[in-house]
Image (cartoon, helix red, strand yellow):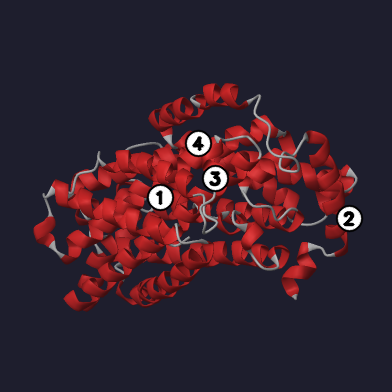
Amino acid sequence: MVGSGFFIAPSVLARFGTTALIGWAVMAVGAISLGMVFARLAHIAPATGGPYAYTRMGFGRFAGFLIAWGYWISIWASLPAMAAALVGYLLALFPALTGHRLLGIAIALGSMWGVALVNLRGVKEAGIFQVVTTYTKLVPFVAIALLGLFWIDWHSFETVNPSGQPFLSALAATAPITMFAFLGIESATVPAGDVIDPRRTIPRATVLGTIVSALIYILGTAVVMGVIPRETLLRSSAPFADAARVMWGPWAATMIALAAIISSVGALNGWTLMLSQVPMAAARDGAMPPVFGHLSRRGVPARGLVISMILSTLLVLLETSGTSALVAFYALIVNLSTDAAMVPYVFCSVVEAILYVNRRPVSRALRVGPFTPAAIVAFVFSVGTIYGAGERAGMWSLILILLAAPVWVLLRDVRSPPGETLSRADADRERDAIDADSDSTPLSSAGRR
């Protein structure tokens, strides 16, 4: 989860002052609640497809299709933002690249398609690549988040809200930017069919990963804002590298820039994995065009992945390599992809609450366990983030989701092979069987083992 959404965020959030840190803390509560929702759903039904599979189980095939479509859009729309972060930190390493638009585009596209080639080799290879990039990136950024606290100028936080907006409006405006860094909460649930012991592994990875990420985000942003003057931070395309330069010198800036580049590649890898898995699961149920479910000899939905990468490529062609233009491009894509991702989160929060209530009397469901309250909190935060993304992002997200209507019309008479399509009755029977199993192994006890 710790990826490019974190590495440029301090520059985008600098105009909000200390309100940005409050926004991080508030959004961390929402993200942890979402993490608990997905942990519970993964324990109840560890099915490949993540949000699509859960929505289909709770609301039926059409709702699942809309969520798969919107979630798919949010993924391929987010890849250019990650590529933009990668280019931004390359500019910190090689300032001479600034202003060379075509070179910046070539680097972004090369990184995206290089990661796609890794994923085309299979889920196992993509997983190994992800582990390597994760350990490489965490050490330097944890160092900044912890050691950097000794370099903070605490007077930097005296300006609470320099944006000129009312406090609540400014807080809402930080929501899509901060939430973008948390996108990927559900990542572990998407390839559930390929995970060993998913009922135990996925909930742990989801909740613990979200908590650790939240701590790194809040402390890391506080350090950057406390070390770099706000006016300088507004113009930075590599804020963590610039903060490291102030604290420890040029060598540290180089190390942080390299770590950010590796992390951006790792984020690209993780999201590219989901870019293939989500539409594949939907295509198997006849809820996406069959091309997305066609598997290569390596067991990878190669054709669907290539189609998705082409759409991401078209967005990258809008990018420029200048620092101010790059930050503006990043902010636009962040709002769009976050807005599109929140709709699946809203549906999954409702599904988790429905499943929990259906398994117990209502009065008991409302007072036993943290999961239904977490679903309510997650629902409220998801809706609030959609509001904070603004009218422009909301309009484009709505247009892209509405484009799903003609696709559904073309697919409505398509039937998946026997045993693949999950009817509403089948979904009910599946939930009953899952309930019987999960009653004997509650998530709370599984998490303690």
Q: CA distance from mark 4 to mark 3?
A: 33 Å
Q: Residue at position x 69%, y 52% from top? A: 47
Of pointers 1 and 3, the one earlier in the residue sequence: 1
- The residue at which mark 1 appears reads as 19
Q: Amino acid at mark 4?
A: Ile
Q: Of tags 4 and 3, which is closer to the observer?
A: 3
Residue 342 horizontal side relative to residue 116, left or right:
right
Q: Amino acid at mark 1?
A: Thr
Mark 1 element type: helix
In the image, 217 versus 171, the foreground residue is 217
- The residue at which mark 3 appears reads as 294
Q: Of tags 3 and 2, which is closer to the observer?
A: 3
* In the depicted structure, whether residue 246 falls above or below residue 182: below
Q: Of tags 4 and 2, which is closer to the observer?
A: 2
Q: Residue at position x 22%, y 65% from top? A: 242
- The residue at which mark 2 appears reads as 436
Quarter of the figure that contains the C terminus: bottom right
**Residue 13 x/y as whole percent:** 34, 50
Q: Of tags 1 and 3, which is closer to the observer?
A: 3
Q: CA distance from mark 1 to mark 4?
A: 19 Å
- The residue at which mark 4 appears reads as 386
Q: CA distance from mark 4 to mark 2?
A: 36 Å
In the image, 156 versus 42, the foreground residue is 42
